[in-house]
Image: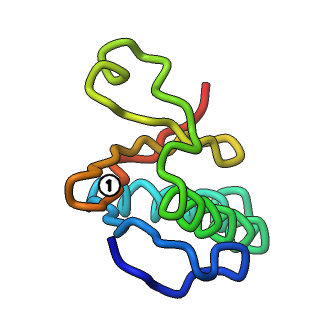
Amino acid sequence: MTQVKVCAAYENVTVYKLTVTELADADLDEIVRYIAVELTAPAAATAFLDKIEEMYDMIRANPRICELSLDSRLRAEGFRRAVVKNYIMLYKVFDERGEVVVCCILTRK
């Protein structure tokens, strides 16, 4: 695990490396585009991105802060769910390499 500078709340905390998959990155782009363009709410899109960044910092500093997935198959594979507004970020923790991998971001229903 690497010592890196994150937001003030997590200074001097050993954090995991964060990897965001291409799928999760594409999901995030689409969500932000939808909020900014379709809902004509660019300020809300920026606020959403801020919340995502806060969640990234939280799961890097404490990867098990969020519960395991409610889906039994995903839970069995170790997926965790982080709720950000109306969306669910699915991620996995790899202790052996000190890494958190964000796999996708889904609409919460």
Amino acid type indicated by mark 1: Val
Mark 1: which secondary structure? strand
Horizontal relation, residue 43 to residue 7: left or right: right
| For residue 78, above or below residue 52 | above
Horizontal relation, residue 100 to residue 81: left or right: left
| For residue 71, above or below residue 43 | above
- Residue 67 image position (x, y, % from top left): 55, 31
- Residue 73 image position (x, y, % from top left): 30, 15
Residue at the image position 32 percent from the left and 31 percent from the top: 78
Residue at the image position 38 percent from the left and 47 percent from the top: 104
| For residue 49, above or below residue 71 | below
Please state which of residues 81 and 16 is positioned toward the viewer in this rendering: 16
| For residue 106, above or below residue 54 | above
- Residue 54 image position (x, y, % from top left): 64, 66
Q: Which residue has dot 1 on it?
A: 101
Q: Residues within 10 Å of mark 1 (few under 14, many from 20)?
A: many
**Where on the picture, by quarter, is residue 10?**
bottom right
Horizontal relation, residue 61 to residue 75: left or right: right
**Where on the picture, by quarter, is residue 24?**
bottom left
Image quadrant for the N terminus?
bottom left
**Where on the picture, by quarter, is residue 45?**
bottom right
Image quadrant for the C terminus?
top right
Residue at the image position 31 percent from the left and 65 percent from the top: 19
